[in-house]
Amino acid sequence: MNYMKAQWLIVTALGLEYKEVRSHLSALQSIVHAKGTQYEVGKFRLDDGEISVALVECGSGNVSAAIEVERGIAAFTPEGILFVGVAGGIKDVRIGDVVCASKVYAYESGKAVATFLPRPQSFQSAYPFVQAALSLARREISDVDGLESPSTPRVVVGPIAAGEKVVAALESAEYRFIRQQYSDAVAVEMEGYGFLHGGYANTANCMVIRGISDLVAEKTEADASGSQPRAARAAATVAFEIISILMHRAPVSDIDWKDLEHIAEELYPLGPLDNQIWDRSGGDVSMLQTWMSGRASWHQALRILRNGGGGNALSPRTLLDQMLRDHPKNVELSSLAIRLTGF
């Protein structure tokens, strides 16, 4: 059961991370899951409209992250899910940089004998998300305010290591183990593996985004300097930049509009009011001519949409999203969605 329309779900571990993500949203509404989980759902404005985003704070640890992402997917069926927070830098990063995880290792996975034998496990972030992060990494971050970094913060795309411990010293056995066994990991944290595991189990598009709040060698000093809020702010900004890239609407051709009209007539023969598809997609039903036949009403409704009307939250994409939720196995619909959205 969907609690509210939410095209995206963002999960955080800490309250300060939640606060920074929340600052990008407007028109927030509180939603309480039947099991007690507290969500907020708000709007994020794009250049050509707005999207709905659900936000939840899961607490620390991979298990809690896996539980909350699974619960959030069931509640909102979002098309994209991000974990946004802070992490400790291991190598090739500076305080203030933002790491978009290409994959996350469960570095504590293995067999404990006389010498610990690693059994590497990892999950990857969704391919389109990684591509969006790579495109963002190729340009400077100019819209992250309040950072006191000695140089412009960067977006870094690379592996992250996740465990159940705070790694706070170069002398720790955990740090030495990560550097030896997972030498390409650029950051370490405590939720990313569980988050991606939960997403994988639900065939969801996911990515972990972490602002570097400290380097393992200088964790205590960095935390005391207020680096965590700044890193969380940077991570939240990058997260919404990636959402904006992924939600960019491809131009809808004449053929695409004809295909959309044909599919809509087939799946909702009574017109845009059939199964409340127009309303559920963010449309304004007061703009529709309800006295027409189903085919004629679809033609009129899509002409309004093509001219930029139909409702502030309505777009070809939101209409396709709702249709796909109703008819996930429809081949024509899936093909059109891929052409227009890319994922």
Image (tube, helix red, strand yellow):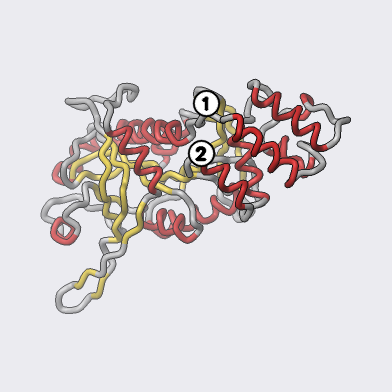
Identity of the residue furthest to the right in this view: 291
Of helix, strand and loop, which one carries label 2? Answer: helix
Residue 15's spot in the image, x, y percent? 42, 40
> Residue 23 got which mark?
none
Return the residue at label 1: 45
Name the residue tied to disc 2: 341
Q: Quadrant of residue 244?
A: top left
* SS category of the residue bearing label 1: strand
Q: Is residue 267 left or right of residue 2?
A: right
Q: In the image shown, does 171 or 43 lie closer to the viewer? A: 43
Task: Specify the amino acid type for callout 2.
Answer: Thr
Residue at 86 percent across and 31 percent down: it is 292
> Which of 297/159 is in front?
297
Question: Among all residues in the image, which is located at the extreme left?
Answer: 171
Residue at image location 60% in from the left, 35% down from the top = 256
Badge 2 crowding class, 10 Å Cα cut-off, few under 14, some 14 to 19, many 20 or more, is: some
Q: Is residue 12 above or below residue 123?
A: above
Query: Seen in the image, is 252 located left or right of residue 111?
Result: right
x and y percentages locating residue 176 in the rendered image: 13, 58
- Give me the residue at 36% from left, 33% from top: 238
Q: Amino acid at mark 1?
A: Arg
Q: Position of residue 252 (x, y in %)?
A: 56, 30
